[in-house]
């Protein structure tokens, strides 16, 4: 049991955005124009909006399984029935919404595939059957609206994990397989059997090779590629010289949206002005454009209500505030923890009415929070943060894009000099998930990343803000990616914690993580190895232990487990970089539970140089110079897990993201909630 002096407090919800937003134009049974919108969020799950096209007012319909049906990762409105079908992540359920019968709400149609966790693409054959591709395993499922049954058709590729099906009105059914070796398969709808056809992309980094699979305005299926143009004719490909335009209202295989917007009755098309990749952000600014140029366009403000977006990284700034990023959408937030309200103030706020709070200018948050908006064109989430010369640098997924924010200047996001925050772009064409970032005394930022979808071997890159110079190194150690970085001032080296992480969609083949020493002056790898520690898993976090030694937290996050690695109990190691050897190690107590969903930044230096750590459920303190640990805070027992999906907020006090320690305050996030723990003396 945790000591009585250890208490945690909720500081508030910094970001309430949405992701996977998609506009579903169409018409109701009486022929009137209809616009439905699907959105996803962490707190409250996915929902469907029925939009009043005159006012922008929304009727909001929540999913019945909000804890697990978080995102509508595939969503599409049938051109035949007008139903909106939604495949949810991370539970792999299929849902349906009927604008003609809104009283039914978002209906749960059942599990797509016992092994699937989220949908990828949706299509419909002429017989009315709905086909859904899902991850992992590039699986295909057939849903029969007449019987209400889902039939799993199994894996469609032995290696790849992603499947995007399309059907033609001639009865053809095919699917694009991604990302390790993109290729097309042709499917027999009667039997579910399939075969590969046409060219493939054997090297995803070769920009001269491409596949674009789509449905044309003639309602047939087409493949445009580096090797020619083809039409799908049942179970064969036929070369063609001309390609028709993509048909509006069809789920795209090459972007997270429709191929083209469908026109509603009256000549209206709808466009979201503030939704980026995957429909992320605030998503409230709607533009209606008429086919007739004499009819004025209209802008509407959508009034949906959000519950909260998961936080993904939290860091301290010299101005005494916390800065961080939320998770899809990637929003920069700020928390002024120095102005935290007292327990008495919070008690008074809890008993006040919303009207009274608004009149007095108060909020229900215990610290001033601010959603500062976009800080990068990377719509996913920031993985790492570093502060250099008073500026906050963030590195984000996708593309490991770097951005910078000056807390002392007005907010105006862009990519030009003077914009704040400013997107600085990519450092190379391979880095994708920037797991770790540090600064070195020479004024450089160093970023360790896992690679793009379908690839192996992560990168280590540096960027020099003063000059704009940069350099990137691929393959620090084969079949690994940097997961943690620490500058060693005595040795003037960078210690790298290595993970077996590959690009998304790639199954891991290696089982051992590792350590590496990088010479930042010579800019080269000096040494790599396991430090003499057997069964070394991913080195997810590093912290100085004193006397030139380093603590390493070792384990596997959910993102590694979903790629096929076996689960392993977390452990602590004491590493001597001079000897290049692990001098002590200990498995963490089993009831501490597994690491958080990725385990990064989970070791933090506290008062007096004492190092604190966290699993996904327990905060612990390390006895200096040893690998002995003391439980500081753990209200919840780790639940029995039914799968290895990226599911956060698994208990009310789960530790999903570990933030900094300021004074005796340990900051962290449980899902969308920013929290603080008072550390005992």
Image: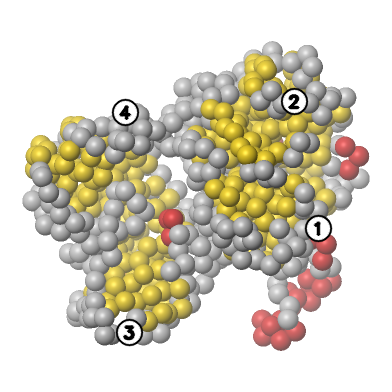
Numbered disc total: 4
Res 138 quadrant in image: top left
Q: Residue at the spot x=43%, y=69% of the render?
A: 273
- The residue where tag 1 is placed is 319
Question: Closer to the camera, 421 or 371?
Answer: 421
Of badges 1 and 3, the one in the foreground is 3
Counting residues from the N terminus, which is met first, the one under dot 1 or under dot 2? 1
Disc 1 + disc 3, Cβ < 8 Å: no
Secondary structure at numbered mark 2: strand
Query: Element under label 3?
Result: loop
Q: Residues within 10 Å of mark 2 (few under 14, many from 20)?
A: many
Label 4 – label 1 distance at C-alpha: 49 Å
- The residue tagged 2 is 493
Left or right of residue 547, residue 229 in this image: left
User: Residue 392: image x %, image y %?
Assistant: 70, 52
Instruction: Mark 4 or mark 1: name the one nearer the start of the chain.
Output: 4
Q: CA distance from mark 3 to mark 4?
A: 49 Å
Q: Which residue is mark 4?
A: 202
Instruction: Measuring from the top left, give residue 406's x and y in whole percent.
Output: 71, 58
Q: Are marks 2 and 3 in contact (CB under 8 Å)?
A: no
The first of marks 2 and 4 along the sequence is 4
Residue 484, located in which quarter of the rendered image? top right
Which residue matches tag 3? 296
Residue drawn at point x = 45 percent, y = 59 percent: 276
Q: Position of residue 262 (x, y in %)?
A: 25, 67
Q: Nearer the viewer, mark 3 or mark 4?
A: 3
């Amino acid at each position: 049991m945790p000591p009585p002096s250890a208490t945690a407090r909720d500081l508030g919800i910094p970001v309430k955005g949405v992701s996977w937003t998609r506009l579903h134009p169409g018409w109701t049974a009486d022929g009137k124009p209809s616009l439905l919108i699907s959105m996803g969020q962490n707190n409250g799950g996915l929902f469907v909006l029925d939009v009043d096209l005159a006012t922008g007012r929304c009727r909001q319909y929540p999913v019945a399984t909000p804890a697990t049906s978080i995102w509508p990762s595939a969503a599409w409105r049938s051109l035949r029935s007008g139903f909106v079908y939604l495949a949810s992540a991370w539970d792999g359920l299929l849902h349906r919404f009927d604008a003609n019968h809104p009283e039914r709400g978002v209906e749960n149609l059942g599990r797509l595939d016992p092994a699937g966790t989220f949908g990828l693409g949706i299509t419909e054959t002429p017989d009315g059957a709905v086909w859904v591709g899902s991850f992992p395993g590039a699986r295909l499922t057939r849903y029969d609206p007449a019987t209400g049954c889902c039939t799993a058709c199994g894996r469609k590729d032995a290696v790849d994990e992603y499947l995007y099906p399309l059907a033609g009105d001639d009865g053809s059914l095919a699917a694009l397989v991604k990302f390790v070796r993109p290729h097309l398969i042709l499917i027999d709808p009667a039997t579910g059997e399939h075969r590969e056809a046409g060219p493939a992309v054997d090297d995803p980094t070769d920009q001269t090779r491409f596949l674009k699979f789509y449905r044309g305005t003639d309602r047939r299926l087409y493949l445009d590629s580096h090797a020619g143009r083809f039409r799908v004719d049942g179970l064969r490909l036929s070369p063609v010289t001309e390609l028709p335009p993509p048909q509006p209202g069809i789920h795209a295989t090459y972007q997270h949206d429709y191929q083209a917007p469908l026109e509603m009755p009256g000549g209206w098309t709808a466009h979201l002005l503030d939704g980026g990749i995957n429909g992320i952000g605030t998503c409230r600014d709607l533009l209606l454009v008429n086919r007739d140029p004499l009819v004025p366009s209209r802008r509407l403000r959508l009034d949906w209500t959000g519950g909260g977006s998961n936080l993904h990284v939290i860091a301290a700034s010299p101005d005494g505030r916390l800065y961080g990023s939320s998770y899809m959408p990637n929003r920069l937030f700020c928390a002024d923890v120095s102005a935290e309200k007292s327990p008495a103030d919070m008690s008074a706020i809890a008993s006040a009415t919303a009207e009274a709070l608004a009149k007095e200018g108060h909020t229900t948050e215990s610290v001033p929070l601010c959603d500062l908006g976009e800080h990068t064109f990377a719509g996913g989430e920031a993985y790492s943060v570093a502060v250099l010369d008073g500026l906050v640098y963030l590195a984000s997924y996708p593309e490991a894009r770097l951005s910078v924010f000056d807390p002392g200047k007005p907010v105006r996001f862009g990519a030009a000099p003077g914009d704040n925050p400013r997107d600085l772009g990519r450092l190379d064409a391979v880095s994708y998930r920037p797991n770790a970032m540090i600064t070195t005394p020479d004024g450089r930022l160093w970023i360790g990343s896992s690679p793009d979808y379908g690839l192996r071997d992560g990168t280590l890159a540096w960027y020099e803000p003063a000059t704009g110079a940069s350099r990137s190194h691929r393959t620090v150690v084969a079949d690994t990616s940097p997961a943690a970085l620490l500058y060693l001032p005595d040795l003037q080296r960078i210690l790298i914690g290595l993970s077996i992480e590959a690009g998304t969609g790639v199954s891991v083949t290696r089982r051992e993580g590792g350590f590496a020493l990088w010479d930042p002056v010579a800019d080269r790898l000096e040494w790599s190895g396991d430090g003499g520690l057997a069964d070394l898993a991913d080195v997810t976090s590093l912290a100085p232990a004193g006397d030139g030694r380093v603590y390493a937290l070792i384990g596997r996050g959910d993102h590694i487990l979903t790629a096929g690695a076996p689960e392993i109990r977390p452990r602590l190691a004491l590493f001597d970089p001079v000897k290049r050897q692990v001098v002590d190690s200990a498995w963490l107590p089993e009831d501490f539970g597994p690491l958080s969903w990725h385990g990064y930044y989970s070791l933090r230096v506290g008062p007096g140089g004492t190092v604190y750590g966290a699993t996904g459920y327990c905060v612990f303190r390390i006895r200096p110079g040893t690998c002995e640990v003391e439980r500081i805070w753990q209200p919840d027992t780790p639940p029995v897990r039914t799968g290895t999906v990226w599911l956060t907020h698994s208990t009310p006090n789960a530790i999903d993201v570990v933030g900094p320690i300021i004074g005796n305050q340990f900051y962290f996030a449980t899902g969308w909630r920013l929290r603080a723990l008072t550390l005992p003396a």
